[in-house]
Image (tube, rainbow, N blue to C red):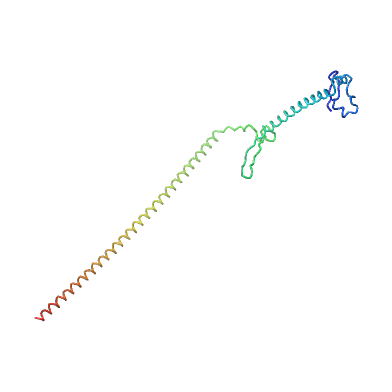
Amino acid sequence: MVIFSCAACKAPSLPAVAKATDPAGDSGRCSAEKQSIAGLGEERYRRETTGLFRKQFDILQQGFNKQLQSSFDMATSEIHVKELDKRASGQAFELILSPNHPEGRPEFPLSPPKKKDLSLEEIQRKLEAAEERRKSHEAEVLKHLAEKREHEKEVLQKAMEENNNFSKMAEEKLNSKMEANKEKRTAQMAAKMERLKEKDKKIEEVRKNKETKEGGGN
């Protein structure tokens, strides 16, 4: 229960709403307050008491809202959201706590470990190892280039051989065709000459037979 003080004598007193719950009614009020109530009227006193209630409630609510907002800001400042995966079925996030948060502090120290100074021998060994790696890399590159050139040479040699074989086969085919045509023409010419000889022979025989007949008639 909230305790109020009397406006006249500053003595503790009950609000007007206590009249409904307090069987004694005005037992909690002093005489000065009773006189004030009688002067102002019960209705006016209730309005003033209700206004006082509202003011105190507003003050408490404002303080609670400020505290709630401060807690929310502190919580959101210590949390970072990282999107992991986005699919048609949903989306996954990862909540990352700030390093200021006890659970978000990394296990490793914030300051990197101090590197020890290298001696001249260690530096020399590192330089020699780097030189060996460089030479090995150059050897690998040269080997790869040599293999590539050898492959290109083999491909070119194979193409030249195929071209030579094709040219040779084409030449042989052409020579064979020309020889066949020559033999064909020779055979045709021989057959034609033979036919001409046979024709001349028949003409000669006809002429002789005609001369024989003419000689016998005489």
**From the image, which quarter does the C terminus lie in?**
bottom left
Displayed quadrant of residue 23: top right
View extreme (left): residue = 218
Q: Position of residue 89 (x, y in %)?
A: 63, 45
In the displayed structure image, the side of residue 140 where residue 7 appears, left or right = right
**From the image, which quarter does the N terminus lie in?**
top right
In the displayed structure image, the side of residue 183 where residue 40 appears, left or right = right
In the displayed structure image, the side of residue 17 where residue 158 appears, left or right = left
Indicate whether 175 appears above or below 119.
below
Q: Count the numbered circles shown.
A: 0
> Between 200 and 41, which is closer to the camera in this rendering?
41
Displayed quadrant of residue 181: bottom left
Q: Where is residue 153 in the image (x, y as percent from the top left)?
A: 40, 50
In the displayed structure image, the side of residue 50 where residue 210 appears, left or right = left
Q: Where is residue 97 in the image (x, y as percent from the top left)?
A: 67, 35
> Between 184 and 11, which is closer to the camera in this rendering?
11
